[in-house]
Amino acid sequence: MNKLIIKYIVFSMAIVCLLFPLSLLAQDSFSPIKFSGSNRMYGQYSNRQGSFSQVPASFLREELYLQLEVYGIPINTSLFLSTEQSGIRQNINTFNFSINPKQLLLNKAKQKLYKSKPGKFFRKLMSTFSTIQVGTCRPVYSPLILNGISVKGVNIEFTPGIFYSAFVSGKTKKRIQNVSASQQTYEQYLQFGKIGIGKENKSHLFISFLHVKDDENSMIPDSSFYIIEADTIFLPGDTIIHNQDTTFSTIKPQENYIVGAEAKLYFFKKKFFIGGEIAMSSVTHDIDAMDIDVKNDIPEWLGDYFQPKINRSIDYAYSVKSKINLKTTKLSGSYKMVGPGFNSFGTPYLRNDLKTYEARFSQSFLKRKISVSSHFRKSEDNLIDWKNSTTTYTIYGISASFRFRKLPYFVVNYSPYLQSNKSDTRKTENKTKIFNLSSGYSYKIKKINASTNFNYSLQNSEMQFDSEVKIYKTSTFSLYETFNFKIPLSISLIASLSNRDYLEEKTQIYTLGFSGTYRVSEKWRNTFGMRFSNQSSEKIKTGFYINSSFPVWKLGIMNLRAEKNSYLNKVQENKGYNEFILRVIFTKKF
């Protein structure tokens, strides 16, 4: 068993043994100390792995959550373990210790606890913090700089009065070595700081700093991963044998510095605000690369700390947004530009070389019985004309809803989409128009509560490659029916018909579904269902499931689900499958 898992299990057992006696002190609603928690075990067995999925067919997960409440301040411990943990991937197993000081001010029912001296001390101390986390954290402080990546370390937000500060420190990646070149990873460490005046949800001015660096000594790349056997090329009358140079595949240790500033101003009791953020990023793509001699260009202390390299890239990003929030009217707009050389290891999924305009509007009438909304967004890349082509995305739409009492509701949406790619020699366009109409009505049939819902969607796509045009069209009609009986039984039915037209090929897909829920008691619930789909009698899918949730004496709640799915493909027989899935979930609260 993984040593880390053993450590977590031993630590969790120690926490339980240490804190469980404290629950005995919770004899009344105003006890200064309370203890609670839950444990959830989730297991799955299947005879096949899901299509296009990296989740294994069978796995086991463990989730442990503990909460110790001292004078109304919740001190939380969470643990997640999974058999999906692998040495060739980043950690799935996590452990976290946190304190939620905000709960202190929200829980007015426990104000009596703060009249004692210990209570007053805890209240005063905790009111200066917004976040205290130790272990695996996912800090969210900026969409440009640090936004939800996993950090194994500490995350603290200290906010006394109008002063604001935040600090994050820890490891973001573990070393992965004995795998192919593209999967190897250095250990990576992150330092983040944020300081300023004001509150996050009020007018403020903050300055941020991020430093992320690979530990170049944590991994020694194995040269055998970067040598490809001799490549043989056969030419008319000749044969050439040569060794390919694959050094470009070698993983290099990197370093990232970011300095940023953000500001937000609220007016008219938060009915209007305007804010923005700007960040400057510097990325060294190889820490071991040659230094640049800048002794005469920058101060010596700055050169020692930010030693420039020959492969360093520097760029910036910024965003501006504003919003008007009235009782029945909402209007917002934003603009974001991310330079082609801007990279943040704290937001690895942020797309660079992109500028985006966005606007949204909504208006309601007759006490929100009628509402209308619209949106517009346009994005464009190739900001410095360094690519062979420029891609532009334009999305806009309008929707309206009508919801009057004792009448059917109606919701209408229309959303065109245009993607254009232009170069000096070629132009490609993808125009898509989506129309959607939904309606429904709830009524009674004697003692049965029933609901009927209808949905129609139409999608027209036109793909143009230079002078060649391809048209794709699909329309779908769906009908949903629900019955709630006086006995603890509810039944749902679904039927849909989809027509697809692509080039000269026309396809029809019929779908039928049935599901029901029966409650034996308040704690014993059973659900069952089946689904059938037929695509032009060539591709047939069937599936059914049964699910039961019930208490196991006083130990906890057991949830069992068995599922059987089959897919018959008469065109490509090797694509068909039969799968069986069994899921078991056991939850214990204490």
Image: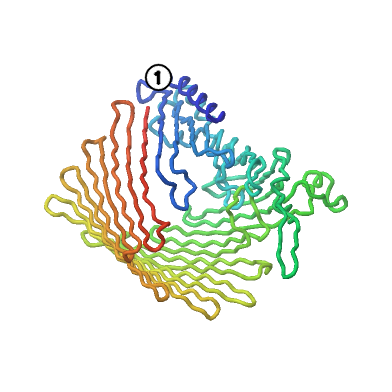
x%, y% of residue 400? Answer: 35, 66
Closer to the camera, 568 or 115? 568
Residue 79 seen in the current view: yes
Relative side of 49 to 537, left or right: right
Vertical relation: 133 (above or below) 20: below
x%, y% of residue 484? Answer: 20, 49
Quarter the C terminus occupies:
top left
Relative side of 237 to 364, left or right: right
Vertical relation: 21 (above or below) 264: above
x%, y% of residue 39? Answer: 41, 31
Closer to the camera, 386 or 301? 386
Quarter of the figure with residue 350 = bottom right
Residue for badge 1:
25
- Residue located 40% across and 37% down the image: 43
Q: What colour scheme has been applied to the protein in the rendered image?
A: rainbow
**Please, what is the three-letter code of the amino acid marked with disc 1?**
Leu
Closer to the camera, 385 or 335? 385
Q: Residues within 10 Å of mark 1 (few under 14, many from 20)?
A: few
Closer to the camera, 76 or 484? 484
Relative side of 52 to 224, left or right: left
Assign a secondary structure to mark 1. Answer: helix
- Residue furthest left as drawn: 446
Relative side of 280 to 562, left or right: right
- Residue located 52% across and 70% down the image: 419
Quarter of the figure with residue 276 = bottom right
Residue 437 seen in the current view: no
* Image label count: 1
x%, y% of residue 274? Answer: 55, 57
- Residue located 34% across and 52% down the image: 566
- Residue furthest front as drawn: 237
